[in-house]
Image: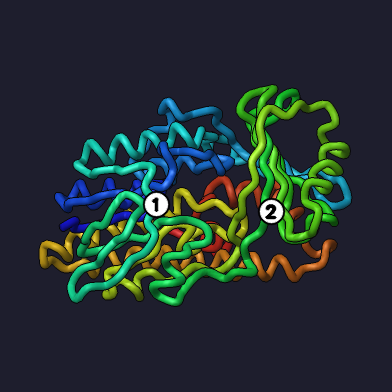
Amino acid sequence: MIEIAVIGGGAAGLIAAREAARMSAEVTVFEEHEGIGEPERCAGLLSLSGLEKLGFSANGSYLQNIVRGAMIKSVRGKWRILDAGRPIAAVVSRRLFDKEIAKQAEQAGAEIICGVRVENVKRNENSFQINTSGGSYRSRWIIDAEGAGAALLGRFLRAGSEPRRWIPIIQLLVENHGLDRRFVYIYLKNYLPDFFAYLIPIDESVGKLGIASRNPGLRKLLKKFLEEEFPGVRCLDSFSHVIYTGHPIDSTALFPMRFIPVGDAAGHVKATTGGGVIMGGLIAARIASAAAISLKKGSPDMLIAEAREMIRELERIAFLRRLIGRMNSPFLGILIALATSKLGGFYLSKSGDMDFQASSVLGFHR
């Protein structure tokens, strides 16, 4: 009998496994791919403060670059700069980063089984039967970190994230971008009304370039963007995926059911940027720790309260995104101008937080 089964070996699932194992719970992770970190489907831009909260060094083998701000190109072609004046984010290789989390989880005592797909889950009184491509298992708790789509979650709980808030994305690894590696670059385009395009430098030549939109013909839009902004780059690699821009599932409300979604499966993603490693990881850590405490008949209330507050922050970020999405271009331009003004830059450099975005804007994040 497994005490806590984690479905999915991405960042959220592995962080959950690490934290539960550190609290002496018996944990098994089921990952459908043959190796951890494969395929790599993330730009890997993570806040330094978030990395620290999750217990990771900014100098690990996964580090590719350190950035201090963002350059934003408006629809009208005008550049604005958000400069914190200090290092604020790391660019990491998600393949190596996830492998590091897996290493820490195994060192804590978790078992990770790769190349095994969970096909079905059934509740049997006080436990769950987990049917996989490699056999059947029983577990007392399940943490569902299966990622985008979350088919098991939909079948088991008849719940899920907002389907219309998933946006297709194409990301390229390119060289010869020629931009300052200290900044990330955001491009607002009329033909990308749902999201934006970006370039995240790894160094002065190589970077991660992405474009996301619900508009049909995304590859044609990518070609148009490259012709406009990066006619000289060479593509080294590419992948297609989806990002989430909707509201999160309140996993804390599902805690009594002992089948709890985390990470992308629960929409624990910043709706403004599609980034979910830090916030999803922080929530998953608390959910898993609460489950481990419950197994020992302790009180999980404090951890559940902390997870709930983080989910509320994601709710506020989703609301903020929808509010901005309704703004016309001139008003959005004014908002960007204010944020990138001297006063706005000073405020963001002192009070801004890449992860607690809504609270930073509202001025009550601690």
Gap in angstroms between the C-alphas marked 1 and 2: 45 Å
Would residue 347 be found to the left or right of residue 105 on screen? right
Q: Is residue 212 visible?
A: yes
Tell me the number on the disc at residue 339. Answer: 2
What percent of the width, then of the height, locates residue 288?
28, 57
Residue shown at 52%/69% (left/top)? 161
What percent of the width, then of the height, locates residue 159?
46, 74
Q: Is residue 247 above or below residue 106?
A: below
Q: Nearer the viewer, mark 1 or mark 2?
A: 1
Give the image quarter of residue 35: top left
Q: Is residue 364 visible?
A: no
Picture quarter with the N terminus? bottom left
Tell me the number on the disc at residue 355. Answer: none
Give yes or no for contact between labels 1 and 2 (Cβ–Cβ under 8 Å).
Answer: no
Would residue 365 be found to the left or right of residue 25 on screen? right
What percent of the width, then of the height, locates residue 72?
74, 45
Tell me the number on the disc at residue 117. Answer: 1
Q: Is residue 286 above or below residue 174?
A: below
Would residue 284 be found to the left or right of residue 137 on screen? right
Judging depth in this view, the residue of 32 and 136 nearest the camera is 136
Give the image quarter of residue 49: top left
Judging depth in this view, the residue of 298 and 340 nearest the camera is 298
Give the image quarter of residue 261: bottom left
Residue shown at 80%/58% (left/top)? 216
Three-letter amino acid code at the position of disc 1: Arg
Three-letter amino acid code at the position of disc 2: Ala
